[in-house]
Image: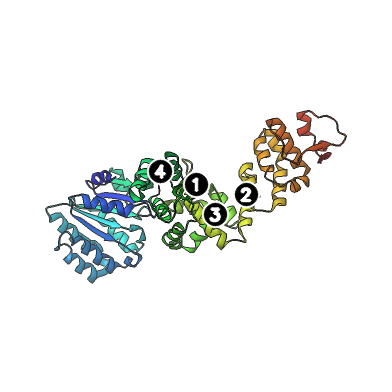
Amino acid sequence: MTDRINQGVKGPLTLLAAPAGFGKTQLLAEWAAQGSFSVAWLTLDREDNDLGRFFRYFVCALQMVDSQLGEETLDFIQSTQSSGLEMGLTLLINELSAIPRNVILVVDDFHVLEEPFILQSLNFLLRELPPQLHVVLAGRCEPALDIAFLRAKGRVTELRADDLRFTNEEVFRFFRQALGLELPAETIAALQERTEGWVTALQLAAISLRDHSNSLAVLQDFHGDAHYLVDFLSEEVLFQQSEEVRQFLLKSAMLDILSGPLCEAVVDPTMPPGCGAAMLEQLEHANLFLAPLDPQHEWFHYHPLFADFLRHVQSETYAEEVPTFHKRAAAWFEAHGNPDEAFRHALASEDLEWAANLIERNVESLIKTGDLQTLTHWIGKLPNVVIHRHPGLGLGYVWGAIVNGKPTKKGVCFACEGKGRQNQGDFIRNRTYWNHVKVV
């Protein structure tokens, strides 16, 4: 990966954008230690959204490679403030153009910058970059800068989360080097799938192993509610967000798949149309562990460990509302022709009568479409006492089991009260026949 950065700094701009804990800073530190470049390094925090403070640190970073750089620029900007930004930066550009060697400026945690005047000044700097200056921006989302002109010319090197994920081989090497563990291939594959190559998750898994003798058992049971992972995601991710974003994340946590309209129905049914899609776009742009499932970016899913973490917090924050969230999801999926997801959420609501009514409404349509496996799977998860109160469920279950050649659920069978043998077509079409079914 350092080779990619070496290639990138031959051009004006290199971007590293990935969620928290994907090893951006560590990668850049390793790269800087290996190279023979003059590297100026600036790490930002939210307090740096002050014009004077930002440019004081900005110039001090450059002075790490040349103590004479930027003094005149800093004096000019601090004396004129926002009205003299471009003039002050022009002075800096002229100074940089006169030095005999290349300078690489790394700006880490760039995502914290929000001050419009600072962003405006950096846009100007990027447009007028002298050949000697190469900028590396690292943060949790794409910087709020106008860099389309550099992209159009192919002068931006970009590394994203997919570039930083650990492969199976890297996971194997990590545990061997960190803990001296030679993990079997199936454990490596399961761990890589579970973490999706997320470096910090792997490091936290390694921490969890230190006090356990059965390493394989710990790894197989590694979820987003693990102590170290909860602390990291709480402090570094969830509580860094606005209240609106936090509520959206937590209320949608029980969804395995997400779309704008579905999230509107689950999170807040009074939400205006389009707001759900806009929020998902915002989360995707912010690299909040959300990945698209289709080329159109209409459907998404949360990173598995992040989803586990959100559900853990959801169960504490919205314990009483979670069944309602599941019911809203079930109703939405039913209305949009996805019975499998509808039934899953209906049962998760733990209101078994409500779930039974929803499934019963769909028995005939599933029989007509031949989707009997879905039908028997979900009816089979209901207690017999509930099925006995819903003859249509018992009939649908037994019919599906017969067609699929599988044994029926213990305690569920049916008898017809005087209606005679029916063929499949009559069985499906004749509603009267259903009214004479007795579950025994």
Above or below, comparing residue 273 to residue 293 in the picture: below
Mark 3 or 2: the one toward you: 2
Task: Give the mark, 4 or 3, whose residue is nearer the N terminus.
Answer: 4
Farthest residue toward the right? 418
Question: Residue 255: where, in percent of width, then height?
Answer: 55, 50
Dot 1 surroundings within 10 Å: few (below 14), some, or many (20 or more)?
many
Relative to 344, 253 lies left or right: left
Task: Give the mark, 1 or 2, whose residue is nearer the N terminus.
Answer: 1
Above or below, comparing residue 352 to residue 433 in the picture: below
Dot 2 surroundings within 10 Å: few (below 14), some, or many (20 or more)?
many
Task: Give the mark, 3 or 2, whose residue is nearer the N terminus.
Answer: 3
Question: Residue 370: where, in percent of width, then height?
Answer: 67, 32
Q: Which residue is mark 2?
A: 345
**Circles 1 and 2: CB atoms closer than 8 Å:** no
Farthest residue toward the top? 423
**Circles 4 and 2: CB atoms closer than 8 Å:** no
Q: Which residue is mark 4?
A: 183
Q: CA distance from mark 4 to mark 3?
A: 35 Å
Tag 1: amino acid: Phe
* Res 74 seen here: yes
Mark 4 or 3: the one toward you: 4
Q: CA distance from mark 4 to mark 2?
A: 36 Å
Question: Residue 250: where, in percent of width, then height?
Answer: 53, 58
Tag 3: amino acid: Ser
Tag 2: amino acid: His
**Circles 3 and 2: CB atoms closer than 8 Å:** no
